[in-house]
Amino acid sequence: MTFVAASRSSPHLVTGIFACNGCRDITCVRIYEGNNDSAPLFKDNGTLEEVVGYYNLAVVNSYPEREQHTAPHFTSKTVERTYLQGIDNARRKQNDAAAAMFRKALDVATCELDENLQKLSLASRINALFDAGRLTEDLKDWAHAIRLDGNKGAHGATELTDEEIAQLESFTELFLIYTFTLPAQVALKKMASEGAK
């Protein structure tokens, strides 16, 4: 982040404005400068004081608030980690890395759907899950789209567009919902129904 300016609203409360060095968007951070013998971190004229080892600062709040992303429910920690890394890279406009991580989330997910298929390639695993009735035709097509776009991100010379990454993220989320979230919710409802009998 690059410091842009600051505005002091009280002797100890100041809002610093910073620009992201990547996307150039602005972030505002309200900072409490506690009692300190050294000079304030932000000067009254809106410039940043270069202070080495400045202590007694606390971030009160910031705007815009950081988005909190979650993976679809009932996914494993490994699938969740790779899926969230895909989202994080997508938000940072690291499209190649995002595509590769969405593909990895699919790779791990298909291994978890049938551990006996782990030695197969991802393409063969997707087809085997479809042949076994574990995936619908649409899910199979989505999975292959994720696989192919993920390959482009990992090995292709041309970076995927933001629109392609958004679609890849959506396909990955829907794949995880249909293969993990919905079956687990149905199983829970079934258990609750049987327990009530």
Image: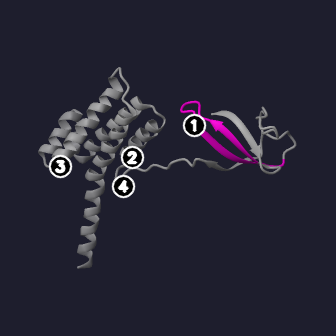
Instruction: Give the color scheme: rainbow, by chain, secondary structure or one colour.
Output: one colour
Nearest to the eye among marks 1 and 4: give it: 1
Nearest to the eye among marks 1 and 2: give it: 1
Residue 80, label in figure: 2
Residue 73, label in figure: 4
Residue 29: percent from left, percent from top: 67, 45
User: What residue is shown with label 3?
Assistant: 134
Nearest to the eye among marks 1 and 3: give it: 1
What kind of element bears circle 3? loop
- Image quarter (top left, top right, bottom left or bottom right) of the C terminus: bottom left
- Label 1 to label 2: alpha-carbon separation: 28 Å
- Label 4 to label 2: alpha-carbon separation: 9 Å
Query: At 23% from the left edge and 74% from the top edge, which residue is drawn?
Result: 194
- Bin the neighbour count of mark 1 within 10 Å (Cα to Cα): few under 14, some 14-19, many 20 and up: few
N-term mark: 3 or 2: 2
User: What residue is shown with label 1?
Assistant: 25
What kind of element bears circle 1? loop
Residue 127 falls left or right of residue 90? left
Look at the image and give the residue range highlighted in magenta: 14-35
Give the amino acid at mark 1.
Asp
Q: Residue 27 sits in which quadrant?
A: top right
